[in-house]
Image: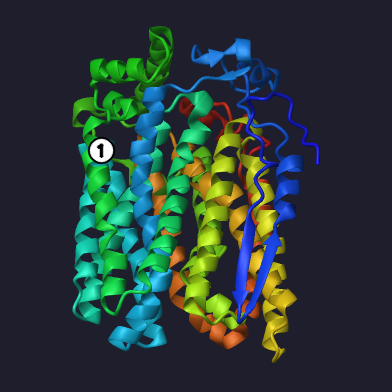
Amino acid sequence: MICPIENPEEIQLCGLTPFIVVLEYKHVICLGLGAFKVFGCLIFPAMKFSSPQELDKQQDHYHLLPDSDPKHGGTRFNKYVLATAILASTNSVLLGYDIGVMSGAVLYIKDDLKITSTQQEILVGCLNLCSLIGSLAAGKTSDSIGRRFTIVLASATFFVGAVLMGLAPSFPFLMAGRVVAGIGVGYSLMIGPVYTAEISPTMTRGFLSSLPEVFINVGILLGYVSNFILSGLPQPLNWRLMLGLAALPATAVALGVIVMPESPRWLVMKGRIDEARRVLIDTSDSEAEADTRLDEMLNAAEASERELPSSSSKWHGQGVWSEFLSPTRPIRRILIAAIGVNFFMQASGNDAIVYYSPQVFKDAGICNRKQQFGITIIMGIVKTFFVFVSALFLDHHGRRPLLLLGTTGMAISLACLGLGSKYLQQCNDKPVWAIALCVVAVCADFSFFSIGLGPITWVYSSEIFPMRLRAQGSSLAISVNRVVSGIVSMTFLSISETITFGGMFFVLSGIMVVGTVFFYMFLPETKGKSLEEIETIFEDKHPQTL
């Protein structure tokens, strides 16, 4: 196959062909996912970032930044910004690890503590519901104490929760650990994308702001690997180690934050202009670029002070919720877009399918736990690969095309998964091709989620709110994300027992069709715009947006 890639420096997707090994009884089925190979060659012909000249041709709000590299037709990464964004985004490993490891740990917890299916759902879903507390509190907290120390608070809270879960002698004690860990997850989900968006240059913000989703998937993969390795240990040591090991990345993140700078936009809102300029010099390729970015932030801060007059040094995010309760037309459009993308991210059922993937595969006829954990590792690799691919293309192809592609693919994949599950439900012999269809459909669903909704939800939520509303606006949107995730996780098994897994997947497919229509109508493109410029695309002078 010849791939339409022009430059040798560009990363070729075509040479990477994930494969799945499905062990069913004594049969070994090796499925080369050639579809992913073709998909990579046709949909993503060239992996490069948009050049400033290309952005200018689109006649939008793009402007030439000094960090661009016209000679090579792309944008250079500032290494300091990249390192900082990676450190901030590493916090997201905590949620990813919990999602991945709980899919296996809950099976042993159910056997050891003799809990019911309802208690199992509550145990899994309560972390997502309790993360609502952290998400809501994180906005006000980060406006008061800063983005950096909020990241430390998130890591410390999750650390306490992980230790409680690992040492839990009973179900109530385990639930207490889940509650504390959930609050830490809520803090980390909100603050990571906001901090990264605020410190990133315009031309690479899409990639850097999507790093939290990349690390969520890395965490999921680590959780799957942990399940596979520790599953051979005796109970209850296996599930205690699975949950307790989450304290290690929490400690590493808290220590790493020591070398991170504070968000320059938060410093501007607090009136600490000199400190903000020093951070911008470090995160820009020249002083000229730093001054340009600082001028934009100062203008946005002055506009905010005119609307909400108060002393900058005494600003702690006051007056934000009154704007949300009585929003202007542009703010209402922003709220609809941010809340909508977060709602559909979790209504897609992706987290629930990850949590309960061993049960889904058991229903498909793969009964051995070691085999189930092995398949989930392959799923984790595919999921991580595609979210990284999406992150690399966000600043070139834009948010909307990848989002629409992802949700359309999810709708089709979930429909195929529903067909396979329904067929297997009516068969006694469990044909190999139907099992293979279900496994490939699950991997395809995860892949399309990682291309679209996964990374773009965090990018979009963190960049569309005005500076004075960004922290608490993102907090509100992610709170919706957490509530929907908790509800879906806590009802997935119960609903599936009523309408079967196949019926549940058909419902999720329908939700994705509705989501695709919503995104097409209500989410404008934000590629290549500074955070200050994004506000203008929701104003009345841009009728194409909402």
Q: Residues within 10 Å of mark 1 (few under 14, many from 20)?
A: some
The residue shown at (61%, 43%) is 523
Q: Which is more toward the observer, 441 or 32? A: 32
Quadrant in which residue 223 is drawn: bottom left
Name the side, left or right, on which 357 lies relative to 302.
right
Residue at 23% across / 62% down in the picture?
A: 161
Q: Which of 446 and 64 is in front in this view?
A: 446
Asked if residue 341 shows in the view, the reply is: yes
- For disc 1, the marked residue is 256
Kind of residue at badge 1: Gly
Q: Is residue 198 above or below residue 248?
A: above
State the residue lying farthest toward the top.
288
x, y percentage for residue 401? 68, 41
| Quadrant into which the N terminus falls | top right
The answer to whether residue 513 is above or below residue 429 is above
Callout 1 secondary element: helix
The percent coordinates of residue 532 (x first, y second) are 46, 26
Q: Quadrant of the C terminus?
A: top right
